[in-house]
Amino acid sequence: MPTPARPRIAVLGAGSIGCHLGGLLADDAEVVLIGRPGAMAAIEREGLTLTGPGEALRVTRRPELATDARAAAGADYVLVTVKSTDTVAAARELAPHLSPGAVVISFQNGLHNPALLRAELADHQVLAGMVPYNVVRTGPAAFHQGSGGKVLLADSPHAAAFLAAAAGTGLRVAAHPDMPGVQAAKLLMNLNNAVNALSDLPLREQLGRRAYRVCLARCQREALAAFRAAGLSPAQLGAVPPTRMPLLLGLPDPLFKRLAGAALRIDAKARSSMWEDLRRGRPTEVDALQGEVVALAERHGLRAPACARLVELVHEAERAAPGTARRWSGADLLAALG
Ligand SMILES: NC(=O)c1ccc[n+]([C@@H]2O[C@H](COP(=O)([O-])OP(=O)(O)OC[C@H]3O[C@@H](n4cnc5c(N)ncnc54)[C@H](OP(=O)(O)O)[C@@H]3O)[C@@H](O)[C@H]2O)c1
């Protein structure tokens, strides 16, 4: 595949992750952010501010702004950063406008977004990507990265120009040979999103409390059993092998804090994007996270009751008026999981 010197990158779904990725890449690529009119107007008015753990991240060139998938025409890469609930609609909007050689990269959580995109965009290369840290909106045009880590991208010749462009920017990206394993490992971590959203606490505080961690450990055990049955092996992304994580999560608070190290190196403001969705009255991705574990378990004759209960509780919270959902204590949530 020819490698354009300065690739054109369109980002469909300019929210937290889209603005973070697109804003950083604009240093060394022609970037267009495609987002909702209100969100794009805020960036137009205020400029894009990206901050990270301890410092402002660099954005030297403002990306172009657009509100229609037509702006993806001519892009070498199209990054899909909409929520999983919007993937199919986004693919259908993109389909008539993609250039013949355009490579589509999903930077979404969950296991199935690349496959959904491939089904809709059969003439295009679709690669899986993974953002390991969390990014929250801290102002109308401001986004904060809560912890460190490298973005991972499928190891493919089609990723070469993207990796080359990213190398000249503040975005840390590496190729990985086993993206299904990476996505499974990320799903294990994302099972905390529901726990965090229902706790209404910052991530560091919530993960510092054992009862919430045991809720997460139960979900992870169910997911690990379903992965095993499906022949899916989660990649090891940090110091702890995925199969050991539930054990670590169940340790008493002082021991967990001593051993967890990197897991708690999250800044005090960071929250899960599912918490943000509930605050704003938007649908969450729980069906693509805990819901995915329930479905995978069922397909292999297993049950995932803790995940199933969390799906119900998050849907209940979605039905509450924004900002009024119950704040679950760790003990109450653990009891509710049965
Ligand atoms: N935030 C994180 O920390 C994080 C970390 C790693 C991975 N991820 C994953 O990244 C994906 C995006 O998450 P996010 O937190 O960035 O979500 P987000 O802030 O909600 O951003 C998505 C944006 O895309 C917009 N959108 C949806 N469909 C669109 C369309 N057809 N055209 C233009 N704009 C459209 C949404 O607008 P509306 O809300 O108006 O629909 C929203 O502003 C998810 O799969 C998430 O799991 C997130």
Image (spheres, helix red, strand yellow):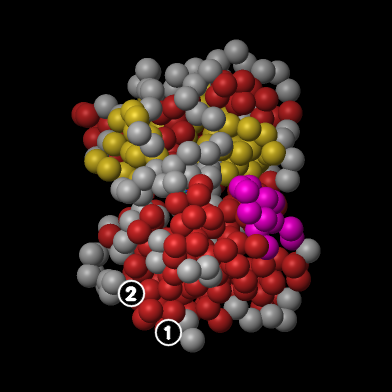
Query: What residue sits 68% from the left and 46% below the top?
Result: 179
Q: Main secondary structure of the magenta part?
A: loop
Asked whether 113 falls inside the magenta stretch, the response is no
Residue 278 image point, x, y percent: 32, 62
Amino acid at dot 1: Ala
Query: What residue sits 73% from the left and 76% below the top?
Result: 300
Toward the top, the furthest residue is: 5
The 10 Å Cα crowd at callout 1, few under 14, some 14 to 19, many 20 or more, is few
In this image, 242 relative to 49: left or right? right
* Residue 70 tag number: none
Q: Which residue is mark 2?
A: 329
Toward the bottom, the furthest residue is: 338
Viewer-closest of 69 and 241: 241
Task: Say whether disc 2 or disc 1 marks the residue closer to the N-terminus.
Answer: 2
Chain part drawn in magenta: 232-243
Query: What residue sits 55% from the left and 15% below the top?
Result: 6
Indicate whether 334 appears above or below 195: below
| Residue 199 visible within the image | yes
Indicate whether 164 appears above or below 92: above
Query: What residue sits 28% from the left and 58% below the top?
Result: 280
**The N terminus appears in which quarter of the rendering?**
top right
* Residue 335 tag number: 1
Q: Quadrant of residue 187?
A: bottom right
Q: Are marks 2 and 1 in contact (CB under 8 Å)?
A: no
The 10 Å Cα crowd at callout 2, few under 14, some 14 to 19, many 20 or more, is some
Viewer-closest of 263 and 162: 263
Amino acid at dot 2: Ser
